[in-house]
Amino acid sequence: MHPLLTDEPGKKMFLMGNEAIARGALEAGVCFATCYPGTPSSEIPEQFFNISKEVSDFYFEYSVNEKVALEVAAGAAQCGIRCMVTMKHVGMNVAADPLMTLAYTGVVGGMVIISADDPSMFSSQNEQDNRYYARFSSLPMLEPSSVPEAKELTKVAYDLSEELKLPVIIRTTTRINHVRTTVELGSLPQRKPVGSFQKNPFNLVTVPAVSRKLHKDLLEKYQRAQEKAEQWPFNECTGNGKIGLISSGVSAAYVKDAIKDLGIADQVKFLKLVFTWPLPRNLITNFLKSVEKVLVVEELEPILENDVKAIAQEAGLAIPIKGKGVGGLGRLYEYDPGLVRKAVAEFVGIQYNPPAPLDLSDVPPLPGRPPNLCAGCPHRATYYEVKEVFGTESVFPTDIGCYTLGLLPPISMADFLICMGSSVSSACGFSRGQPKKVVAFIGDSTFYHSGITGLIDGVHNNHNFTLVILDNGTTAMTGHQPHPGVNPEAMKINRTRVPLEELVRGCGVKDVHVIDPYKVKKSIETLKKAHEYEGVSVVIAEQLCPLFARSTKQLKRSRPFMINYERCKNHRVCINKLACPAMYLDGERVIIDKNLCVGCAVCAQICPENAIVPLKE
Amino acid sequence: MENKRIVMVAVGGQGNVLSARLLGEACMLMGIPAIVSEVHGMAQRGGIVETSINIGDIASPIVSNNEADVLVAFEPLEGLRALNKCNKNTIAIVNTRPLPPFTVAVGQGVYPPVEKTLELMNAKLKKVVAFDGMALAEKANNPLALNMVMLGAFIGLKEVPISLEIMKKVVSEKTKKEFLEPNLLALELGYQAIGN
């Protein structure tokens, strides 16, 4: 049985934030969940995916993208079913279109949308602050400051959602999602996986006349949400000092520790906000009236700070309200306990000596350890082959996935990336904007997510580029989730495959090729045809991700390779052009680590001396 | 007990995320508050994986620069790189077996000699315990059990009140049964490596 289905109220489990959120949803009776995976949110749907294989009254799907995920859940929510939709922060941009108007129609069954933000961009292309989405959509937002709170908050968010008849956004950050601590389980209710739909077109079909009324309704719900925020038990005020501190999310944990570490509990009054939109304006006003000055501690944008300033202005309060700029608190990157401690000490005006940094001036420059494509990764072979045909001067728009690592030397074949799917559409512009060849790279999952629209555009508008779809049979980057093109049998899922090649041809592409990147010579011959083609050509580089192949027992056992030093003339084409992590230098000699080599044989095919041979057993 | 801030650094694949989680589980079993933080995603593709474990009355999930009480380095270069997490009172446990990054193989940097690394760490930190953890993992018949060796060594340091028996119990309950025997042996060998 899946551990999150443990029905022992009071039992303690050591859970990751994402597991705690999934458990909170289960404790609220959620039985319908959708997502597109994305760090740091991916482990929430992973729980649901595994649970849905075990129990028949929980529906879960990996949707094609976040917009689709939200729309699928919106349909279920209209039937009165409790559902959850999860995404990373930039996924919210993809889902923004349905989000803004789903706020108008509202929901019947409770809906919680998880927006997992990534300050410091551990695994993201930007660090946008999704607290703006609550303000943008007028939807309520809750922000947990700890893992146990994330579970409790998720649970009660469903009651809030059904009471207000609105989706509720829970905004987390990496340091909630990817943190583990002790969580106490509550009880699991009976799930109700089937509801009913009451037709109500003049409240649910958002033509202008309907939406004019619905927007007014939304603002009334928003008022009620604000009243709920005023009474929200998770908002917490501690201390009786004259110096005010306001915070939310994981920053509140840093503030709590700073107060204790600095021994200033008697000097400060701390307001931790959990219901962060609409803001509890009266609660904040009363707080402001009780202190002499206030420091707002929040990662990223000064959103709360500006709102608190506006609330003070309306209340006619002239006390100093500070935030960004105090003791190194900035708009960039995530905060940490030391940074917040320093800022709080400065604001309170006490002497504080942080632990002195070590003198590291005698430490030599250290070699970098950037992430790298795995040993035997088929993307490495594809990049090598494309470079052989298209050279280094072609323009290479790329996309989001493991293959973005093609940015690094010695591959160095990534020129532009802004978001999921941008490789294909930007290739259209690059092919018009300059004379050189354009080769766009996209992964299979990303292609289904949002690459296909760019491809249709490219065909229809007669653009001229080659699209290489790196089809490794899974969503590799985020942990091998399925997508519409995967082999359902291998993944043991009851789903229908949407074949990639047929899809590409169906988009109107005339020049379509499928290669096996492990076959170097043949792949290069095929790529030459795409190179000569005028118009949109597509090359599907089909080879399973070796990690995925291993975990799904599809890896064909191949012997690892070794170097025959009698033949090797030390050209080092292998290590210099491929930089496979199974290879390393020992003195002047290239060595293949037999424990890492998966036997793809790509290096053996490019060695000018044929010196790379299968290991003799 | 005194609060302890622990940082574990490793190369993707060495398994420090599991070590940190098991340490957290052991704390829970002992009724000691613990928060474990880990970084996922890009870091897993052979890059650096840093985890932190805050034990005691601490709400924050991460450890700031200069604030680690204990550094557990699964790889010597990464130990050296993580000195920014340490201060003069930090205790470090270091596996001395190098795992050179591919940047070194393609000539984009020089791997610092292990003796030099240990000399630098010894000069700056309160105490450095260095040993070939990989050799112990190999002795335990599982090269993948380096994470158990390092976990055993951390327990052996006795900076937190978790006994080897408790740790063994957690490992027995929370890791794959097929590797249990080598894992327990690796844990024990690590524990002994620290002078127990």
Image (cartoon, coloured by chain):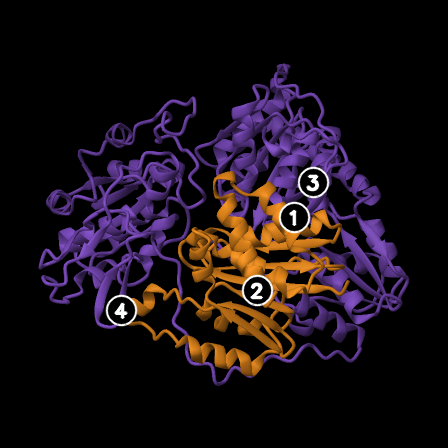
Chain colours: A purple, B orange
Q: Are marks 2 and 3 in contact (CB under 8 Å)?
A: no
List the residue tagged with mark 2.
A332
Q: Disc number at residue A586?
A: 4
Q: Number of labelled discs?
A: 4
- Could you tell me residue A107's position as x and y percent? 65, 27
Amino acid type assigned to the residue bearing label 3 in the image: Lys
Amino acid type assigned to the residue bearing label 1 in the image: Glu
Q: Disc number at residue B25?
A: 1
Q: Are marks 2 and 4 in contact (CB under 8 Å)?
A: no
**Residue depicted at 58% across the width and 58% down the height:** B152
Whole-number angstrom distance, CA of label 4 to CA of label 1: 40 Å
Pick whichever, A408 or A296, lies toward us: A408
Q: Chain of mark 3?
A: A
Does residue A284 sit above or below B131 in this rendering? above
SS class of the residue under badge 1? Answer: helix
Circle 1 packing at 10 Å, graded few (<14), some (14-19), many (20+), is: many
Q: Are marks 1 and 2 on the same chain?
A: no
In-image side of B87 versus A308 (left or right): left
Does residue A568 sit above or below A31 in this rendering? below
